[in-house]
Amino acid sequence: MRNISFSITLDSFGNGTKDVTRRLGWKFLKPGDHLCAVEKAQGLKKGQHVRKIGEIEIISCEFEQLRCIQFSHHRADDTRDNRIRTEMVREGFPHYTALEFVNMFCKFNRCTPETEINRIVFKKVK
């Protein structure tokens, strides 16, 4: 089973509030796939091992420009502000605005707001 890291959203993954993640690539994913959720998968020092934190099942995945999160159309909430706020909570960043999230993602992944990313919805199965 392939690993997927949740190093910067470990708490929200653990408490179950995170069920959306955005990734560069991951074009092979499809609904029903299972992945091993890990604390950290890359940059491990000699002697360190991957620490498994659960298993997830992919519910949906769709490609969109990262900046689309600012115009979130994914949620059925009453207002645009509620949709964006809900999306930030689902991403594991409840105190971020959409713009703050986009800026953080771009810095962390060395990309731009126009970069096509994979919006992945998942559920924890273990």
Image (spheres, rainbow, N blue to C red):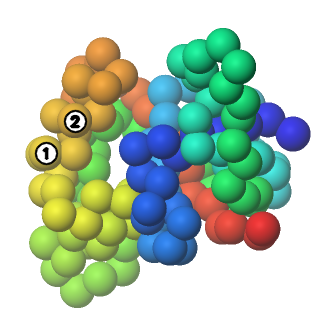
Residue at the extreme front of the image, as rendered: 47
Q: Quarter-wise, where is residue 85 in the image?
A: bottom left
Secondary element type, mark 2: helix
Residue at coordinates 52% horizontally, 62% vertically from top-left? 13
Amino acid marked by disc 1: Glu
In the picture of the structure, the residue carrying the numbered disc 1 is 100
Q: Residue at x 66, y 13 (%)?
A: 46
Along the horizontal axis of the image, is 49 left or right of 109? right
Q: Residues within 10 Å of mark 2 (few under 14, many from 20)?
A: few
**Vertical order, 111 against 49 (above or below):** above
Question: Residue beneath label 2, please?
Answer: 104
Name above or below for residue 14 compared with residue 107. Answer: below
Q: Check the picture and name the quadrant holding the N terminus.
A: top right
Q: Is the Cβ of the residue at disc 1 closer than 8 Å to that at disc 2?
A: yes
Residue 104 seen in this snapshot: yes
- Residue 114 appears anywhere in the view: no
- Image coordinates of residue 51 in percent, x first then y, are 69, 43
Is 36 on the left or on the right of 95, as rendered?
A: right
Q: Amino acid at mark 2?
A: Met
As drawn, the label of residue 109 is none
Query: SS for tag 1?
Result: helix
Q: How many discs appear?
A: 2
Q: Residue at x 67, y 26 (%)?
A: 48
In the displayed orientation, state which residue is furthest to the right.
1
Instruction: Name the spot of residue 64 as percent of width and height, x first.
Output: 41, 38
Give the crowd class for mark 1: few <14, some 14-19, many >=20 residues within 10 Å: some
> What residue is shown at x 40% (from left), y 28% (from top)?
116
Q: Position of residue 122 (x, y in %)?
A: 63, 61
Residue 41's image quarter? Answer: top right
Q: Position of residue 4 (x, y in %)?
A: 65, 39
Q: CA distance from mark 1 to mark 2?
A: 6 Å
Q: Report the quarter where the C terminus lies.
A: bottom right
